[in-house]
Amino acid sequence: MNRRTLLSNAGLALAGFGLQACAPRRVATATPQAPAAPRRPMIYLPPVRVSAERVIRATVGLRPHRPSGFVLKDARLDQKTVIHNYGHGGSGMSLSWGTGAMAADMALGHQERRAAVLGSGVVGLTAARQLQRRGFAVTIYAANVPPDVTSNFSLAGWTPTSGLVETPRRTAEWDAQMREAAAIAYRQLQFMAGARYGISWITNYGPTESAEFNVPTNPILPAALMGSATMLQPGEHPFPTPYCSERPEMRIEPNIYLPALMDDVVRFGGRIVIRRFESTRDVMALSENLIVNCTGLGAKALFGDDELMPLKGLLVLLPAQDEVKYSTSGGVNIPASQRGLFIHMMPRTDGIVLGGTSQRDIWTTDVDEAEKQRIIDNHITLFRSMRMPGAPAPSPTPAAARQ
Ligand SMILES: Cc1cc2nc3c(=O)[nH]c(=O)nc-3n(C[C@H](O)[C@H](O)[C@H](O)COP(=O)(O)OP(=O)(O)OC[C@H]3O[C@@H](n4cnc5c(N)ncnc54)[C@H](O)[C@@H]3O)c2cc1C
C-alpha cells in the first residue's frame, strides 16, 4: 500500500461526526516526528468568508437514529402488508436508493401491484421510484413534502455510516442488509451525477495533526464503497496543521435533488397526496393493501418504535462563493473541550453550508445559539489560518506543543 494513500475505510472516519458505528483506530501512514518532504506542489485554496453577519439562514433537522440501525422488513397488519424502511440516521441521503430497492424487491413477493408509500422525504421518494421501476402504481401519502422535510436540512454528502448504528447492536443480518443497500445506492447516485439531480464530485480536505488515518476497527463497508484518501504532507496544503487528508466526496444538493425526485415520481404516473396519519388505524383505512413505511422519525409514534430518537443537526448557511470548489472536514486549534465535535463545510448552489452538530435525543427544532456560534467560530479560525500565495511556510508544530 502506498503510505500516502489509503484505500480503506479512511473516508468513513473522515466523513462524519455522529459516527457511532465503529471504534476508530489509527493506521500510520508516515512517522509523525519526521514529516516527509513535500512531493506535490502546494495547493492554495480560496478561503470561505465566515462571520456571524454573513449568515443567511440556519436550519435544524432531526436525523432518525436507531442504535440498532435502520429497519428494513415486511410485516402483516390486519389484511395489509407493511414494508418498513426507516431509521437511516445521518445516512439517509446516501443509502435510500439501496434500501428502497430492497423494499421494492420485497414488495414483488406480493400479488398487489398498487402500493402506498408513506413519507415524502428522500427515503419515501426513492422507494417510490424503485417500486415504479418494478411496475407498481404508486401513491405517496405524506404530512409534509420537500422542502419541509428533514431530508432538505441535510448537508449532504456520501456518508453511508454516519449516525446510523451503534457497534454493540449490529447483527450479521443487519450488516449484510447494510452492505447490499450501500452498494446499490453508491452505484445509483453515480449514474445521477449532473445538473438535473444536483449531484457532483468535489475534493474534500481534512486538516489533521496526525499523519495517521482514523480507521474503524470493525468496519461495516468494504473500502470500495468508501473511496480512497491521500494524506498530504507539510508544504503540500494550505492549512496550519502538519497534515491534511484529501479525498473525493460526493455532494448531493437537497434543494435540487428532492424536487427532481418528486418530478420523476409524478412523470412515471405516481401521485403525491398530503395527508397526516395519526394512528395505524388511519393507515389501515387506505385502499392499498401494500404499504411501504418511510416515515423516518414519524415511525416512532405511528408504529410504536421506541428505539427511534433524533440526532439533532444544525446547519449554518452563508452566501454562495463561486470560487470555493472544495469541502472541508474538521478544523484547527479547536479547544480541548470541543474536540470530538466535528465541523464540516460544503459549498452548494444555495449557499456555503457549515455544519457540525449531532445532539442525541433532542427533539426541539430551535436553533441552539451556542452551537451556532461554535460552528461559526471554528470555521473562522480554520479559514483565517489558511496559507495564502506568497506567505512564508509555517513550520509544522504538533498540537501538544501549542497547548
Ligand atoms: C444536519 C444534517 C446533516 C445531514 N447530512 C447527511 C449527509 O451528509 N449524508 C446523508 O446521507 N445523510 C445526511 N443526513 C441525514 C438525512 O437527512 C436523513 O437520514 C434523511 O433525511 C432521512 O430521510 P427520511 O425520508 O427517512 O425522513 P424525512 O425527510 O423526515 O421524511 C419523512 C417523511 O415522512 C412523513 N411523515 C412522518 N410521519 C408521518 C405521519 N404520521 N403521517 C404522514 N406522514 C408522515 C413526513 O412528512 C416526511 O414526508 C443529515 C441530516 C441532518 C439533519
Image (cartoon, rainbow, N blue to C red):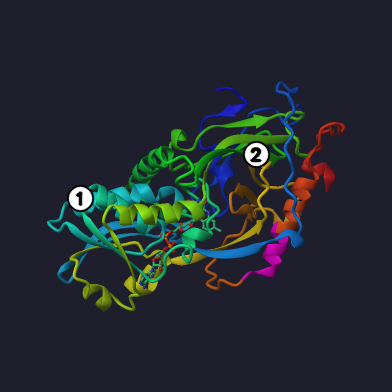
In the image, residue 368 lies in the stretch drawn in magenta: yes
> What predominant SS class does the magenta segment belong to?
helix
Give whichever of 312, 290 is nearer the camera: 290
* Residue 273 on image: x %, y %: 32, 68
- The answer for how far apart the CA atoms under marks 1 and 2 are is 43 Å
Residue numbers of the magenta segment? 367-375
**Is disc 1 placed on a helix, strand or loop?**
loop
Mark 2: few, some, or many residues within 10 Å (few <14, many ≥20)? Answer: many
Give whichever of 107, 256 is nearer the camera: 256
| Lateral position of residue 24 relative to residue 368, left or right | left
In this rendering, the answer to whether 256 lies above or below 13 is below
The residue shown at (35%, 41%) is 184
Q: Residue furthest left?
A: 111
The dot on residue 205 is: 2
Q: Quadrant of ligand 1?
A: bottom left
In this rendering, the answer to whether 224 lies above or below 343 is above
| Lateral position of residue 47 relative to residue 145, left or right | right
Name the quadrant of the N terminus.
top right
| Lateral position of residue 25 relative to residue 66, left or right | right
Give whichever of 298, 348 is nearer the camera: 348
In the rendered structure, which disc, 1 or 2, sits on the residue that comes first in sequence? 1
* Residue 185 on image: x %, y %: 39, 44
In the image, residue 398 lies in the stretch drawn in magenta: no
Q: Amino acid at mark 1?
A: Gly
Say whether mark 2 is within 8 Å of ligand 1. Answer: no
| Residue hosting label 1 | 135
Mark 1: few, some, or many residues within 10 Å (few <14, many ≥20)? Answer: few
The residue shown at (60%, 72%) is 366
Q: Amino acid at mark 2?
A: Tyr
